Amino acid sequence: MCFIFLVLFKLITKDSMNIHTITNTIFHSKTYILTEEGNNETWVIDCGDALPVIEYINTNCLSLKGIFITHSHFDHIYGLNDVVKKYPNVNIYTSEAGEKGLYNVKGNLSAYHEHPWAYGFKNIVVLTEQAKLLVFDKLIGIYATPGHDVSCLSFKVDSHFFTGDSYIPGIKTFTLWPLSDKQEAVQSEKRVLEIVTKENLIIKAGH
């Protein structure tokens, strides 16, 4: 039934990317679920609360292709284990430093929460700015934007720029974590603004 619906939907609509936003319970971090009309593939940016992600995917007959991590702080990753248990073939995309943070309770800051958390799987793809990866047949832009954390990446998908906590409009980047760097944060903010202005992008921040 889902397949028939998707085929009919594709025939009568023009393809375009849609973004479903989830505000998570921990620190109100943001999870973004990317879909395209007429396509049953979906991609996720960061993963806080697992249940609404799973419910959205199942309700809309979607196939989860990958999860991009803007940085490995606990409030942006704590739902990963539950989502990957449900969809074991999915890849997790992060930086080299992000991979380390996923497995380290101090690195991802969960050691300072009530329940320390570490990632329990090995399905990680380490990204650099030179990586070539398609999302809905579009080449995704990958940008190192450290400062808030050494692991920070920002992602350009179509006309949207997912900045995590590297740039939150109207809020100064927080740089008091153990792996923060104030000077790098300033440079990353400038880089984000230059890219957004030059390419007329819509910012989707981590909070």
Image: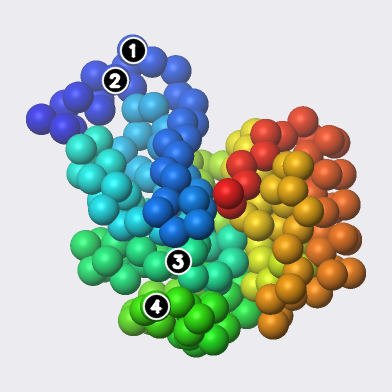
Look at the image and tell me in which quarter the N terminus lies.
top left
Q: As displayed, is residue 1 above or below residue 96?
A: above
Mark 3 and 1 residues: CB-CB less than 8 Å, in contact? Answer: no
Amino acid type of disc 3?
A: Ile
- Residue located beneath label 3 in the image: 77
- Residue located beneath label 4 in the image: 114
Secondary structure category for the residue under label 3: loop
Give the label on residue 12, or none: 1
Residue count near mark 1 (Cα–Cα under 10 Å), binned few <14, some 14–19, many ≥20: few
Mark 2 and 1 residues: CB-CB less than 8 Å, in contact? Answer: yes
Please provide percent x and percent y for residue 138.
57, 42
Amino acid type of disc 1?
A: Ile
Query: Whole-Å distance between the Cαs marked 2 and 4?
Result: 45 Å
- Residue located beneath label 2 in the image: 9
Amino acid type of disc 2?
A: Phe
Please provide percent x and percent y for residue 74.
49, 70
Q: Residue 14 lies in what quarter of the image?
A: top left
Dot in front, 3 or 1: 3
